[in-house]
Amino acid sequence: MDQKQKTIAVIGLGLIGGSFARAFKKYTDYTVIGFNRTRSTAELALEQGVIDAIGTDDNLREADVVLLSLYPKASCDFVEQHIEHFRPGCIITDDCGIKEYLVDRLTDLCRAHGLYYVGGHPMAGREVSGYKASHADLYKGASMLLVPTAASTPEIVQRVKDMFAKIGFSQLVVTTPEHHDRMIAYTSQLCHVISSAYIKSPSEMEHKGYSGGSYRDLTRVAYLNETMWTELFIENRRALVPEIDEVIRHLTEYRDAIEQEDADTLFRLLRDGKRRKEQFG
């Protein structure tokens, strides 16, 4: 980003937003303004030097970049409610797990007010949430997905890429909102659905002493923020429901082969799954 862009406002200081604030303070010379619904969290961040100022309508006008780190609906609501307080030419980006919803709500609004908008989604996180779990190196080596919009230009997208590269992202992937949401339905959201469903077996109550790495891998993301994931699943239902249907179809194939003692079919199903993993990693 050019030398004039030195102030970033982070809207929401939870795990992801707090980690962004920490990273920008550690690895760049940006002034960081922090907005948070719970003022005590913002005060703690200020006391710890994670942010330089607690966000207000007045200092929001100073921000060259605004990073939305709230749930999707709340992120869009924040922009709508504060639209008159953004600096003209300000770049707005976000870290939300869905993109079509935000692009639909923010693109025309930003264009009408002389603002830029580039969607974003970091491929990084932890099972725990909240500001106290945030870490400056959370994004080291991670992938950052970026979604250009009609409220951006190639130059603006490059500036956003450069900004995120400074705090450790090793891959900066440019995609469309539709492709983003379809891929995230498969690589992230479906995994959370399966993990949450799997752990509801009555056998779960007796797993201790019988579980190892496979169990831990499959149940890790069942520990989730149900408020956030409910919103993400429903807003991305057009992409997620077909992925769930696909898993149900394949599970039925395995179930039927096992029940019918059809060793040849079961062998083929298992071999095909193994080959798919070998081919695509």
Image (tube, helix red, strand yellow):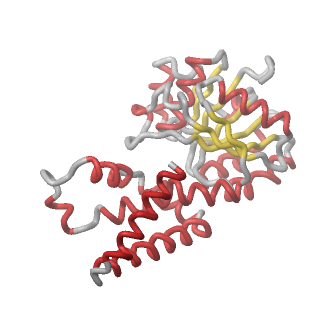
Please tell me which residue lies in front, 226 or 167.
Answer: 167
* Image-quadrant location for residue 21: top right
The residue lying at 27 percent from left, 53 percent from top is: 215
Please tell me which residue lies in front, 113 or 154.
Answer: 154
Please tell me which residue lies in front, 276 or 94.
Answer: 276
- 232 vs 61: above or below: below
* Image-quadrant location for residue 104: bottom right
* Image-quadrant location for residue 103: bottom right
The residue lying at 14 percent from left, 52 percent from top is: 208
Left or right of 36? Residue 119 is right
- 124 vs 48: above or below: below
The residue lying at 37 percent from left, 59 percent from top is: 195
Residue at the outermost bottom position: 260
Q: For the N terminus, give its image quadrant.
A: top right
x, y percent for residue 261: 27, 80
Please tell me which residue lies in front, 189 or 104.
Answer: 189
Q: How many marks?
A: 0
x, y percent for residue 152: 83, 43
x, y percent for residue 194: 40, 63
- 61 vs 226: above or below: above
Left or right of 90? Residue 22 is left
The residue lying at 60 percent from left, 30 percent from top is: 169
